[in-house]
Image (cartoon, rainbow, N blue to C red):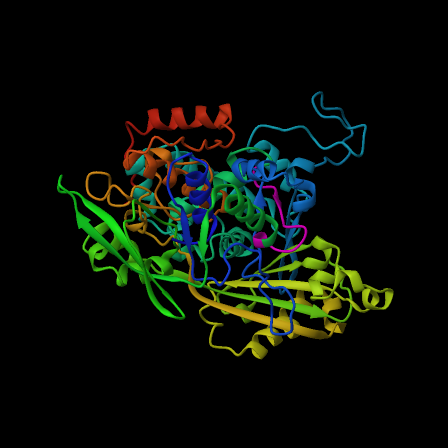
Amino acid sequence: VGGGWGGWGAAKALCQSNTDCDVILVDALPDPTGATKYLSKSGKPVEAGTRGFWKDYPNINALCDELNLDQDEIFTPFTNSSFYSPDGLEATAPVFSETKLPKLPFPIPFLNQNDDDDAIPQLPSPLGQIIATFPLFERIPLPDRASMVGLLLATIDCLGGDEDVQMQYDRMTAHDLFIRFGLSKRMVDDFIRPTLLVGLFKPPEELSALVVMELLYYYALAHQDSFDVRWIKSGTVSDSLIAPLAAKLQDESDLEVLGGCRVGEISLTTTSDGKHSADTVSYQTKEGTVEINDVDGVILALGCKGMESVINSSPDLARLPVFSKAASLKGIDVISVRLWFDTVVETRTPANVFSKFDELRGSGGTFFMLDQFQGNPPELWGEDAEDDTDEKRAARGSVVACDFYNAGALLSLSDEDIVNVLTKTLLPSAVPKFADAKVVDSWVGKYAGTVSWFSPGSYVSRPPLEGAGTGVLPNVKCAGDWVRMGEREHGAKGLCQERAYVSGIEAANSLLKSTGSNGANQDVIPVREDEAQFKAGVQLNNNVMKFIPRFWVR
C-alpha cells in the first residue's frame, strides 16, 4: 500500500523472491508507475518537490545498474549549494570530493599542490569537511564556526549510544541541544536553521535532537564526501527511475499496479493460535469500493497522512496501539512551485537555499535552476522534441523549481501571491538578474501535512518495520523513511530516499519470513563503514559515560 520508494522497494523484493504469489501495489496517484507524466494545466511537466541523491545511496545506485541505467545520464554531477539571506550570499556548501586547497607557501607531504585540477585526497572526518568548508562560509566568522565542536561531541554520544540513550536525545529539541552545547546564535541563524528547514523541513525548536544529529553525522562525521549530492538530470524521479523499475516488475514478474485507488479498511481475523491476521483490503475507486480478499500479507508503505487515513478507516488496526500512535503523528506542509521565465538567468550554483527572509513566514525555501541541471530541452517546456527549432530554443528562458517546507503560513496565500513572493522579493534578492526576467508560465502545488515530521518525542510513536510484531500481527509490516527498523536499521538516516527504499526491501524480507515463505530475501547493501576515528570516539565516550550522568538530556 503506497507507491513511494518504500512501496516500490517492497514490491521489487517480493516480486524477485521467487515466491509463488501475486503482488499488488495500490496507490491513490492515477499512475504510480511514472509512465504518465504529471503535467500542469498548460501541459508542462511538474513534480512535487525536488529531491537530491546523496553519495551514500548504495542501493539506489545498484538499482540503476540493475536496470541498465547509465548513472551519468540519470544524475547530474555532484553540485554546490548556495545559501542566500537579505544580506546576500551567506555560505556555499561544497562538493567535498572535489575540494581543492589554495596554494600554500610550504609543501604538505600528503597533499598534491602541483596540479590545479587535483582535489585533495580523502581526509579523516571531520578534518576533510573543515578544510572543504573553510573558504566557502563567506560571512560566518571563524569563532562562530568553531562553536560547533560541542555539538560534534554530543553527536558521538547520541549515535554511539544504545536505543535508550537515543530516546533521551529524541525527547529534547534541537534548539535546547544547541544552547546546552554552546552553539553561537550566528551559526544557528545563518547556517544551521536554514539547513534544517530544507533538510528536515522544520526549525530546530520543532525537531528532535536525535534526528538532527543523524543529519549532522553525515555532514561532519561520516566521510569527507558523504554529504555530496546530485540531482535528476532529465525529467523527474518518477519517469527516470520509478518508470523503468515498474516496467521491469510488470513485464518479468506480473506485478499488478492499481493506480487511482485509495485504500480504506484493512480487516483482520483471529487465527487458531490467537494471533491477528490481515485478510481483506478494501479500496475506493471512481466506481465505488473494491475488496481484495484472502490476502496473505500487507506492507503499509505510507507517510503520516496516508497512515492516518488508513488507520481511521480500519477499526481492527486502530485497536492496536502501535498503529493508532503512528496515525497520531502529524506531517509537514509543503508548497512546490515551478516558474518558466522569458530569459536565461545565470546563478552561482544550480541548487540554492533562502534563509532569514521575512517573506518566508517561518518556512524553509529552496530554488533549483532546472535549465542548468537538464540543459533546457524542449521536454522541460512541454514541447515536442521532434519539432524543435532554433527559434523555439532561443525563446526558452530559465526554468526554476522552488519548494517551501514548513509552509503552513504560506498555504492560505493564492497561487498568484506565492508566485509574486518569489518573483518580486525572494529570487531578485538572491540573484538580482531575476528582477529583469518575466514569468511566462507558472505552476503551484500545495501539499498539506504530507512530509514526515520528526518532532521531539516522536520516536516512540513512529511505526516499527515489524508493525505490531510477529507475536501479534505477523502479516502486516511498515515501510517508509519514518519507520523504526530495529535490528534491520540501515546507515541511511532521516528524510531519505535511500532509507525509504531499503525499508521497503526489509519489510518484504520480514513479511516473507513471518508468513513462512521459502522465497529468497533481497540483499541490502550497507553504507560505508564508520571511519576508525569515529569508532574510537564512540568507544572512548561510552567508557567515560559509565561514570558521568547525562545531565543535559531528559
State which quarter of the image contains the C terminus: top left
The answer to whether residue 290 is left or right of residue 50 is left
| Residue 517 visible in the picture | yes
Q: Residue at x 54, y 39 (%)?
A: 57
Q: Is residue 257 left or right of residue 455?
A: right
- Residue in the picture at 39% in, 24% down: 539
Front position in the image: 368 or 232: 232
Name the residue located 72 percent from the left edge and 35 percent from the top edge. Answer: 101
How far across and how far down the image is residue 319, in percent?
Answer: 18, 55
Q: Which residues are magenta?
A: 226-238
Spot occupied by residue 180 in the image (x, y as percentages of width and height): 38, 46
Residue found at the very far top of the displayed protein: 109
Task: Name, please, the residue furthest toward the right.
Answer: 390
Residue 229 lies in the magenta stretch: yes
The spot of residue 411 in percent (x, y) is: 47, 73
Residue 552 visible from this viewpoint: no
**Could you tell me which residue is drawn at 50 percent across and 55 percent down?**
193
48 vs 216: above or below: below
- 458 or 246, which lies in front? 246
Residue 138 pos. (x, y %): 66, 50
| Magenta stretch holds residue 53 | no
Q: Nearer the viewer, residue 518 or 9?
A: 518
Total numbered labels: 0
> Residue 38 appears in which quarter of the rendering?
bottom right
Magenta segment, prevailing SS (helix, strand or loop): loop
Tell me the quarter of the picture where residue 48 sits. bottom right
472, above or below 356, in the image: above
